[in-house]
Amino acid sequence: MAATRSIHRWAAECVTLFLVLGLVGCLERTETITVEPDGTVLIEAVFKTDQEGELYEGDAIPSDAGGWLVEVQEVEQDGERRFHLTAAGVFGPLFKLPANYAVPGDPDTALYLQFPTTVEIEDRADGVYYHFHRTYPARPWAHIEALREVLLDGPTRKLKDKDKDDYTPADWKLIARSYTDFEAAKLLTFARGAYLETTPDVPQDAWLDVLGAFRKMQGELDLDVIAEVMQIDDEDEREEAIALEVKAWEEKSFKTLDASLRDFCGYGGARMKDFMRRYQSRLKDYDVTSGLGDDAFVITVVMPGAIVGSNADETSPDRATWKFSGRRFRDRRVELMVTSRSDFLDP
């Protein structure tokens, strides 16, 4: 069993929170949606970032394989290297609008950001009304953030006002313990959910044995080693060392989980495969939601005629624009709505 997806994310969290002042890469997502009078919809999406990996990690992005016309450029902006991905698509009146950017057939489609979108045309006595509606379903988040507050943010809050040069060995060890405790609780939360779906009728003492084995492993961690690598002066060397320690922790954790599920719960073969599929699904869903939190969205809809109502942040006679962070999707359903009116089309 192996899951390395979160290694660099966790390492980056460690470094960002306590050791450096830089920000994790942010993705700027600009989308312009133009609704034509006949119901045809033109969509242009532009993704901008200073870290190329941000384009291809986490949430799905438009691709040629997904039916989009895509161009990726590397540009210089204010002396900094930036990466721009531009995607365009045209959807006729009878075509269903995209609800995500996944490639058709991707087994992880449901885990990516969803945005089911519709355009309805209604004839009324005073003209033609166009109703644009998009929904971003809520993405689960609070249950993990509660663990973060109790196991990570709470215990380390007293260190936020201290310069890292003033950290004592006990402070560094507290950081190491807090991170490993939080990551362990998160792993077990995802594993428990996958376990209950895979084997809902197994007596609970089998899972308690799994939990006991995992806690024993966690108690045997050498926190001094983890604390030591966090204090390496060279940033690149430090990040690499932290990533190696995180990888070693994850490998040991999954080895313990694998062995205890086999020993205490009779897992193996198809059952273990089913468990891992469900576990990885939970992990990826969380990682996508976490990554979206750093993204900045600007959605502009250009409507036929004149806008008569919307819930947008900004409007002009025929445009509605929403601006928000990807954090807005956490445990909250988001709707974009705009209605316009146009005179009847010539026959």
Image (cartoon, grey):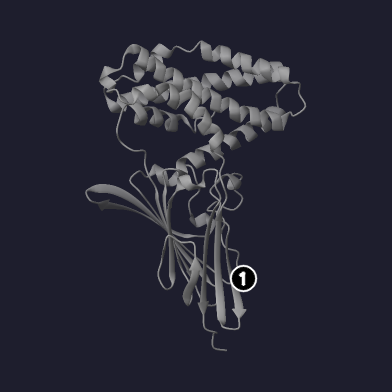
Location of residue 309 with respect to 172 vertically, above or below: below
Residue 1 in sight from this viewpoint: no
Could you say whether the residue bearing mark 1 is in a helix, strand or loop?
A: loop
Where the C terminus falls, by quadrant?
A: bottom right
Splitting the image into 4 quarters, where does residue 229 fall?
Answer: top left
Q: Residues within 10 Å of mark 1 (few under 14, many from 20)?
A: few
Location of residue 345 with respect to 333 vertically, above or below: below
Q: Position of residue 242 (x, y in %)?
A: 39, 23
Where the N terminus falls, by quadrant?
A: top right
Q: Position of residue 77 (x, y in %)?
A: 25, 52
Q: Position of residue 268 (x, y in %)?
A: 70, 24
Q: Residue beneath label 1, please?
A: 94
Q: Residue furthest left?
A: 79
Report the side of 59 relative to 170 (left or right): right
Splitting the image into 4 quarters, where does residue 233 fall?
Answer: top left
Type of residue at label 1?
Answer: Leu
Kindly identify the residue that appears in the image at 61 percent across and 79 percent down: 123
Kindly identify the residue that appears in the image at 48 percent across and 54 percent down: 62
Residue 151 in sight from this viewpoint: yes
Q: Nearer the viewer, residue 115 or 94?
A: 115
